[in-house]
Image (cartoon, rainbow, N blue to C red):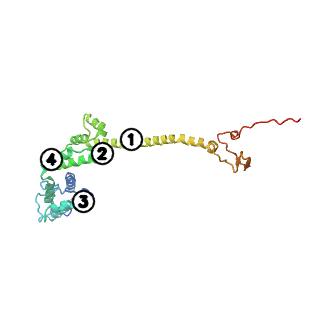
Amino acid sequence: MSETQKYHPALAISNIKNIIPITLDIKNGQYNSWSQLFKIHCRAYDVLDHILPTVTTSDASSTTTNNTDADPLWSRVDAIVLQWLYVTISNELRSTILEDDQTAAQAWTRIQSVFQDNKNTLALYLQRQFTNIKLDDFLDVSSYCQEIKTIADKLNNVGDKVTEPRMVLQLITGLNDDYDVVGTYFTQMSDLPSFYKARSKLVLEETRKQKQVITNSTSTESAMLTTTNQTKQPASTESVQSNNRGPSNFRYGNSRGCGRGSNNYRGRSNRGRGRANYGSNPIWNHYPPYSYQHSPLAQ
């Protein structure tokens, strides 16, 4: 950069988190995405040479040396890029790579080494994870597909490139019997669909199945309610018919009358206005046979 240059595009950035929303962490496995976003941002603001010294920026006076004393503006811009790095990584990772008087390029290299050391061992571990991803282990299709993408990104970070057809094949392999029709459709295509298209198809199928379950449940409840109402109807009719027969004491011979008084035919008494309940036997069964005698004729 020229010593006479007083302004640089990087000085206009006030909040790097608005441009790079990812917070890089040792455990989240997003190094590949984070590094790509960070390099794009540095290229857009003409500071890519601050993290990759072998890259020459559009400014012909830029060099690969960190000549901070000769170019105060370069030193200021490098400090700004270093701030971008510190702000977009976690506290744990920042403590791991932080050193006194380090440049942005040194910090970038240390972050890279954290995620790419022991690549062979990590790649073997991630390969096992990738091949054992099953839909049954997740709550929904979206979570299942996201896990495939996350593990694929981690493999890419350690140099084991996962192609898109390989991701689609793993997506099909991990499906259960509920999505067997969709998986068969994918494998019978002349060309495998893209990962995101396959994901969209599975999400659509999941939505269809959920609606079908709701519809079947509603139909079952309606059928049960109809059956219950039909079962209760004869009992109600019988109850109405029973009530229409009148009091039961007239039918089964209860000795008590339904009036206020009582009738005793044997005692020739009649109190009250109630009707007698004769029961099932006629009243003449209670009297002895009557013998008729002719009175003598007058002589």
Which x, y percent locates residue 76? 17, 64
Question: Is any part of residue 81 visible from this angle?
Answer: no
Mark nearer the viewer, 3 or 1? 1
Amino acid carrying label 4: it is: Leu
Mark nearer the viewer, 3 or 2? 2
Secondary structure under badge 2? helix
Secondary structure under badge 1? helix
Amino acid carrying label 1: it is: Gln
Q: Quadrant of the C terminus?
A: top right
Q: Residue furthest front?
A: 299
Q: Marks 1/4: CA distance?
A: 41 Å
Question: Is any part of residue 243 visible from this angle?
Answer: yes
Which x, y percent locates residue 158? 15, 49
The disc, 4 or 3, on the residue closer to the chain's N-terminal end is 3
Q: Marks 4/3: CA distance?
A: 35 Å
The disc, 3 or 1, on the residue closer to the chain's N-terminal end is 3
Mark nearer the viewer, 4 or 3? 4
Amino acid carrying label 2: it is: Val
Relative to residue 209, is residue 54 drawn left or right? left
Q: Label 4: which residue?
A: 124
Which of 24 and 172 lies nearest the eye of the viewer? 172
Q: Label 2: which residue?
A: 141
Q: Label 1: which residue?
A: 212
Q: Marks 2/1: CA distance?
A: 17 Å
Q: Marks 3/1: CA distance?
A: 46 Å
On screen, residue 196 above or below 1: above
